[in-house]
């Protein structure tokens, strides 16, 4: 199934199936699924996400977490958002990245993502993975999220490749090991 629209239609059906919602067939592994797509299809996938999260007929509750929006929100909370461009210009991109990594970690993202109570039929959908690079890498976030969302499926919309062992963002960056997820399609 190579056509992105066919794959997204399949995903729409899949996330509503009881087997998906309950994590059946995963050999007692955590219910983390990766939907990989060609980064050139970002506009199509973005349209799908906006459409499905607004669709009242979907029989699961999609909890979309856009990592880039979360990043901006954390920067606002820390009162550093307006200082970032000046810091990059004066101190350089590497220094800025180091400072952001020391100030914003997985716990800040989890604090923004976490909600209670989780309900039967909830699906945590992670988006904005490519937009938040290099400030946050999804493999480290998934490791940190597992204890907080072990009772529900996590669906990562991923602009790149996942071979079951390594995530390769944008189909070109150095792959990162992550073996606790499953490809959706």
Image (spheres, rainbow, N blue to C red):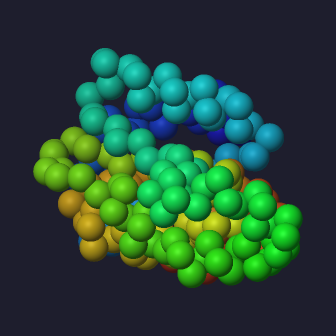
Q: Nearer the viewer, residue 33 or 61?
A: 61
Residue 116 lies, with reference to residue 26, above or below; the image says: above
Residue 86 lies, with reference to residue 4, above or below; the image says: below
Which image quadrant for residue 122? top left
Residue 15 lies, with reference to residue 124, above or below; the image says: above
Left or right: where does residue 74 sit relative to residue 145? right
Q: Position of residue 54 (x, y in %)?
A: 40, 22
Q: Position of residue 179 (x, y in %)?
A: 51, 76
Whether residue 6 is visible here, answered yes or no, is no
Could you tell me how many numbered marks the image carries? Answer: 0
Q: Residue at x 85, y 70 (%)?
A: 90
Q: Nearer the viewer, residue 115 or 5?
A: 115
Left or right: where does residue 112 sit relative to residue 81? left
Q: Residue at x 43, y 63 (%)?
A: 109
Q: Residue at x 63, y 34 (%)?
A: 45
Q: Nearer the viewer, residue 125 or 24?
A: 125
Q: Residue at x 48, y 37 (%)?
A: 11
Q: Position of residue 181 (x, y in %)?
A: 47, 67
Whether residue 151 is visible here, answered yes or no, is yes
Q: Position of residue 50 (x, y in %)?
A: 51, 27
Left or right: where does residue 57 sit relative to residue 185? left
Q: Quadrant of the N terminus?
A: top right
Left or right: where does residue 119 sit relative to residue 156? left
Q: Nearer the viewer, residue 86 or 134?
A: 86
């Amino acid at each position: 199934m190579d056509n992105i629209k066919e794959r997204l239609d399949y995903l729409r059906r899949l996330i509503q199936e009881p087997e998906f919602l309950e994590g059946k067939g995963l050999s007692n592994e955590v219910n983390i699924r990766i939907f990989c797509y060609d980064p050139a299809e970002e506009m199509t996938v973005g349209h799908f996400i906006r459409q499905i999260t607004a669709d009242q007929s979907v029989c699961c509750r999609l909890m979309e977490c856009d990592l880039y929006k979360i990043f901006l929100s954390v920067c606002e909370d820390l009162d550093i958002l307006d200082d970032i461009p000046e810091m990059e210009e004066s101190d350089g991109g590497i220094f800025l990245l180091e400072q952001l990594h020391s100030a914003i970690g997985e716990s800040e993202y989890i604090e923004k993502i976490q909600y209670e109570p989780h309900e039967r039929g909830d699906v945590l959908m992670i988006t904005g993975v490519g937009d938040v690079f290099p400030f946050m890498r999804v493999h480290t976030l998934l490791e940190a999220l597992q204890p907080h969302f072990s009772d529900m499926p996590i669906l990562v919309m991923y602009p790149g490749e996942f071979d079951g062992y390594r995530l390769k963002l944008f189909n070109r960056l150095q792959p990162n090991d992550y073996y606790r997820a499953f490809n959706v399609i």
